[in-house]
Amino acid sequence: MLPFAGRHDVLPFTHLHVEVAHGDLRLICSDRHTLAIVREPLTATTADFTACVSVPADTVAEYLDTLDDDAHADLAIENDKLVLAYMHTDVRIPAQPSELPWRKIVTANLPPTDVPTGRLAVDASHLARLRAAQAFTMPKTPLRLQLRGADNAIIATVGGTFLALIKPSQPSARPRRRPFGRSTTGSTFSTNERHVRRTVQPHDVH
């Protein structure tokens, strides 16, 4: 999640936004140009507990960078702070009400009446390799994406200096009904009236 947060911008785009409602936990980040949302069901929660807060994304990243890749940390969510706990160390990060209108952003770009023009299944790690294009990107020169060929290969170009071809990893499948995927692997939750606590791994939000 954190790579989607802005680095040299203003609130709310430099923050990690955390929402708890209706038994779900949502993490949201946006840098104006991109937006990412993770939604996971809570395995145990107080029915009336809700939270909608934000914390500086770089503060969370600095703490997670101190942990080993296979370390587990506890995340306690309260209405005025997030508590990250690992071993015998607790890091308390003051939180403030979230001001990111992410639902409006999603609705504006994905209206209910919109009809998908096509679907692809692509390995996310292959898309991540497009970061190499940054070395060739001149000011105001965009990375252009096209679908070409019978297999709908993704062609990425930057002017005439960079080209990448990414083939779909498998035939297109029907979209899932759930908007943001649900996964409980490696995650446990416990709650009381005051906060939600989750066991997370550092790579969950990197």
Image: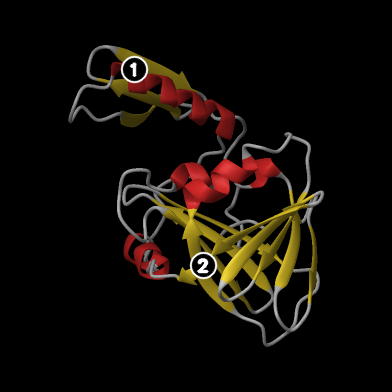
Q: Which residue is mark 1?
A: 135
Locate residue 150, reporting x and y percent.
45, 26
Name of the residue lying farthest toward the left:
140
Q: Is residue 2 above or below residue 125?
A: below
Q: Secondary structure at mark 2?
A: loop
x and y, in percent, of residue 98 in the image = 44, 70
Q: Position of residue 140 (x, y in %)?
A: 17, 31
Q: Residue at x 36, y 21 (%)?
A: 133
Query: In the image, which disc is placed on residue 205?
Result: none
The amino acid type found where label 1 is placed reads Ala
Do the CB atoms of the residues marked 1 and 2 lie less than 8 Å apart?
Answer: no
Tag 1's secondary structure? helix
Relative placement, left or right, of 141 versus 52 is left
- Left or right of 147? Residue 168 is right
- For the residue pair 204 and 159, the one nearer the viewer reads as 204
Query: Can I make out residue 179 in this image?
Result: no
Hey, which quadrant is residue 13 in on the image? bottom left
Q: State the scheme by which the image is colored.
A: secondary structure
Q: Which label's residue is closer to the chain start, 1 or 2?
A: 2
Percent position of residue 137, x then y: 27, 22
- Pointer 2 residue: 95
Q: Is residue 161 visible?
A: yes
